[in-house]
Amino acid sequence: MCTEASVEGKKYFDEMLLYGDACWDEWLQRTDQVREKLARFLGASKQEVAFAPNTSMAMGIIAQLLRHTGAVITMEDEFPSSTIPWINLGYALDFILPEDGRYSIKNIERSLRPEHKILVTSYVQYKTGFRQNLTELGHFCKAANLIFVVNATQGLGIFPVDVMRSQIDFLVFSGLKWACAGYGAAGLFVSKNHLPHMPNPFAGWRSVRLPETMNNRQSELNDEASSLEAGSPSFPSVFALGGALDLITRIGTEACLNRVMYLSQHLEEKLRQHGFPVMYSFTGENRSGIIMLRTANATTLVDELSKRNIMISARGEGLRISVNIYNNEADIDRLISVLNEMKALV
């Protein structure tokens, strides 16, 4: 979690400790301000943005909204939060196999069948680092009459997202990863093209048009994505996300993108120079901040590296090494040095 996120989250707890819920109206105003920030970040309107506690819940909401629409086609490498909500509701899912870690439009088109009505994909695949061209895929989905659903968890915060330009119908993401906002903050985008036509799968006291009236017989729901939040917001998590978005905006989205792309390339080059087996090499628009290192001892290496305060993950057939804006060349040099010491394990 970045400092700005921590400060904003802590501010809520300090206010709650001192004043109880006397700040309720102010908290609602601040929540709406974060909603506007997130909408700008996504190229959306604030009426299309809702907050959720995590990606799985947000994806589950989408799956509920689209019930009886048709079968789902998705990627073999998807994180379970992209698939399990659909499986749980009885959707038929078909999985596209990658080609050297990639999912090209041609590959997706070859896998498509008439019963497929929904395409679910991650912006960046969590165990390969492949970054999808959302605009290209969005145009394909529109032409193929597919509802386009994106899990942006491994990309949003560093890699640009424009839901309008990419013709995205639904998008979810967790603030935990590249947005640097910690656990408990997730975003949900629902295109205005869908909002008026979908009954809420559930509703709560803040789903209605005038929640302040406390009318327990009110049935008229508001027609904004926020109605899906149902009840009181998770204020500290939302405020933390707002702080993180402020940091990224202050640095500059292009500067963040360029920094991570440079570090990612630098890391791959260093690994190859020292003879470490890099699993995939993506270039240009398909590169992300994730580099995979092939090893049969991923779990052991993760444990040993963590003892030296080097935090990476065991994913699939290897080590997932991620660089973010707070990393630098010295971090990469230290990682390479320690990996060289442990080369027998790699």
Image: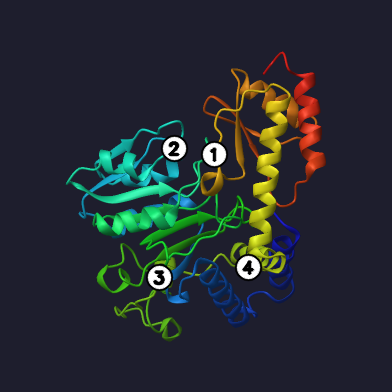
Q: Nearer the viewer, mark 2 or mark 3?
A: 2
Q: Residue at x 43, y 76 (%)?
A: 47
Give me the residue at 44% from left, 37% from top.
102
Q: CA distance from mark 1 to mark 4?
A: 31 Å
What amino acid type should be assigned to the residue bearing mark 3?
A: Ala
> Could you give the CA–CA distance between mark 2 and mark 3, rounded to whole angstroms?
33 Å
Element carrying mark 4: helix
Cβ atoms under marks 1 and 2 closer than 8 Å: yes
Dot 2 crowding, Cα within 10 Å, few <14, some 14–19, many 20+: some
Q: Quadrant of residue 275?
A: top right
Lower sequence index among marks 2 and 3: 2
Kindly report which numbered mark, 1 or 4, lies closer to the viewer in this rendering.
1
Q: Residue at coordinates 71% horizontally, 39% vertically from top-left?
A: 266
Give the total number of marks visible in the rendering: 4
Percent coordinates x, y for residue 135 in the rendering: 42, 58
Q: SS class of the residue under badge 1?
A: loop
- Residue where numbered disc 2 is placed: 102
Mark drawn on residue 282: 1
Q: Secondary structure at mark 2?
A: loop
Q: Which residue is mark 4?
A: 242
Q: Earlier in the sequence, mark 1 or mark 2?
A: 2
Q: Residues within 10 Å of mark 1 (few under 14, many from 20)?
A: some
**What is the number of the mark on residue 199?**
none
Label 4 amino acid? Gly
Q: Position of residue 137 (x, y in %)?
A: 37, 53
The amino acid pointed to by label 1 is: Phe
